[in-house]
Image: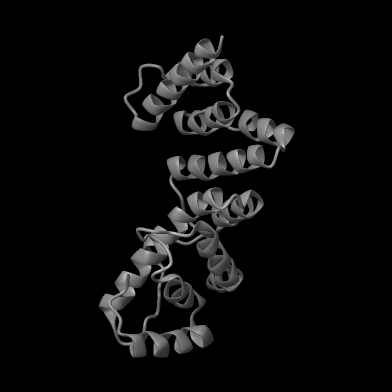
Amino acid sequence: MLPLKTKEKRELLKWSKQNNPLVFLVLTMDGKWDTEYDDDENVCVHFLKCWPAVKEELAKRGTPQDLDEIDMDYPDDDDLASDALLDFINLLYSMPDYFDGAKRYADGEAFCRDLLPLFIWDQTEIDELWGHIGFFLDRQDQIEARDELFSSREMTETMAQYYSLCFLERGDADRAEEIMSPYKDSEDDVTEARFAWIDDTRQGRNNEE
């Protein structure tokens, strides 16, 4: 949470609502996310109210931008500006999981598609965003669109992690293993978790038999 007193936060909320949608988003979300008892639906509802204005503001500034160098334009307080930028960045990275937790799959897909052209991403981050999009398509039962997305992009380890997740969520260990097989010797934590899930799914199926 930002180190703000109630009166100060109220004044900055009023200022930012008129002058800076990015800061207004951070202040609006302050205390609602990254807490011990997050309410995914509540996080998504408040975020989505602010997001259109944030997109519009970023478009005015010109895109793509370096996410780490976004000017938060916090009045007369460089430390708070730095804290606000860190919250802004972490919030963007966290939102796909909140959309997933709230089962707002269409909103999650749209948000990830919004992010792609807004900022400068490295290749792993690009794969993460496309992976989220593919998973959100799967959750919406848009299977043909999901498969087309994953087949149209290079099947990196990150993409394979997301594609295999779609099948594991549906109990298809064989297809998940086929996708992950090029990375069976990887020491990546997520990849190791995928293979453990594959084994657990098979074990559960064998127990049922």
Res 154 seen here: no
Q: Indicate whether 161 appears above or below 21.
A: above
- Total marks shown come to 0
- Quadrant of the rendering where the N terminus is positioned: bottom left
* Placement of the C terminus among the 4 image quadrants: top right
> Is residue 169 among the parts visible in the rendering?
yes
Residue 43 in the figure: left or right of residue 184 = right
Q: Is residue 171 above or below residue 6?
A: above
Residue sitting at the far front:
208
Q: Which x, y percent locates residue 62?
A: 54, 68
Where, by quadrant of the figure, is residue 32 drawn? bottom left
**Residue at left offset 30%, top offset 71%:** 82
Q: Is residue 79 left or right of residue 125?
A: left
* Residue nearest the viewer, comparing 203 with 12: 203
Please state if 109 lies on the left or on the right of 201 as rendered. Answer: right
Q: Position of residue 67 (x, y in %)?
A: 42, 60
The residue at 47%/78% (across/down) is: 24
- In the displayed structure, 176 sits above or below 112; it is above
Q: Nearer the viewer, residue 197 or 49?
A: 197
Describe the colour scheme in one phrase.
Answer: one colour
Coordinates of residue 193 in the picture (x, y in percent):
39, 28
**Relative to residue 12, is residue 47 depicted above or below?**
above
Front-most of 131 and 153?
A: 131
Residue 145, percent from left and from top: 71, 36
Q: Quadrant of residue 148?
A: top right
Classify residue 69 by image quadrant. Answer: bottom left
Residue at figure coordinates x 52%, y 45% from the top left: 129
